[in-house]
Amino acid sequence: MSRDWTLSTFGPKTALCVMAAEPEYGPALRARIRPLITGVGPVEAAAGVAHALALLQAEDALPDLLVSLGSAGSRTLDHARVYRVTGVSYRDMDASVLGFPKGETPYPRLPAVLPLLDGPAALPPARLATGASVVSGGAYDAVEADMVDMETFAVVRAAARFGVPVMGLRGVSDGRTDLSTLAHWTDALAEVDQALAAALDLLHDPFTPARTEFA
């Protein structure tokens, strides 16, 4: 992975912005940040974030926080609107056959929902569920969250190993209708780009990130 990302500054805080894929990184965001683009899915996200933070740790330059941003799917939330993520679950985790609650990671014992650093109060809150599949149509019936993505839970877990809190900002790109072609996702990304850029502008107001409580 080439190091074509840089840390961003929001007020007095430094941040590593993290995104999954180039199509989400539109002109409005390009004018503001140079994010780490990990690739799609929890494995790529965890590997990419851990690698980047290890490099920064070796330089004694860990950021104050990570900002996980990009698109999300939702059957109920407003199209193209950005939401601040209050908590994230791992919808693929199911060890219930062994007696553990569905969604809870058994070893290490992690709760089903992990808290995130709160985002700007001007943005509405939402619960997020991460998994390795694209959710569409009736698959939303099994999701106990307001919106879905494929990276944030993994980003939170990787960052926790370095003691860095994570803020989640997600713009809704799809979900009201079934997905059947790539364009059903990409057609909305120009609007999401503008909305995410406006959300990042809110981070220049003073805020104090709280450290994560799990490792």
Image: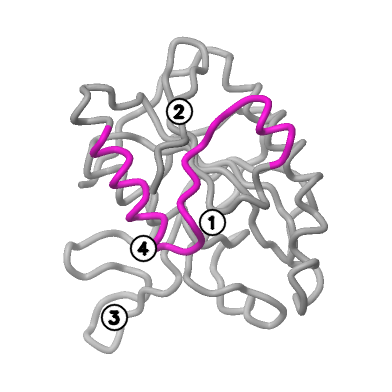
Point out residue 180 in the picture as x, y percentages from the top left corner. Answer: 76, 79
Distance from label 2 to label 4 (Cα)? Answer: 32 Å
Q: Does dot 3 land on a helix, a strand or a loop?
A: loop
Return the disc, 2 or 1, that comes first in the chain's sequence: 2
The residue mark sitting in front, 2 or 1, is 2
On the image, which quarter does residue 27 sit in?
A: top right
The image quadrant of residue 82 is top right
Above/below status of 88 relative to 7: below
**Amino acid at dot 1:** Leu
Q: Label 1: which residue?
A: 128
Q: Residues within 10 Å of mark 2 (few under 14, many from 20)?
A: few
Q: Circle 3 sits on which residue?
A: 95
Residue position marked by numbered label 4 in the rendering:
112
Q: Secondary structure at mark 4?
A: loop
Q: Marks 3 and 2, Cα distance to the nearest angstrom? A: 38 Å
Residue ID for mark 2: 6
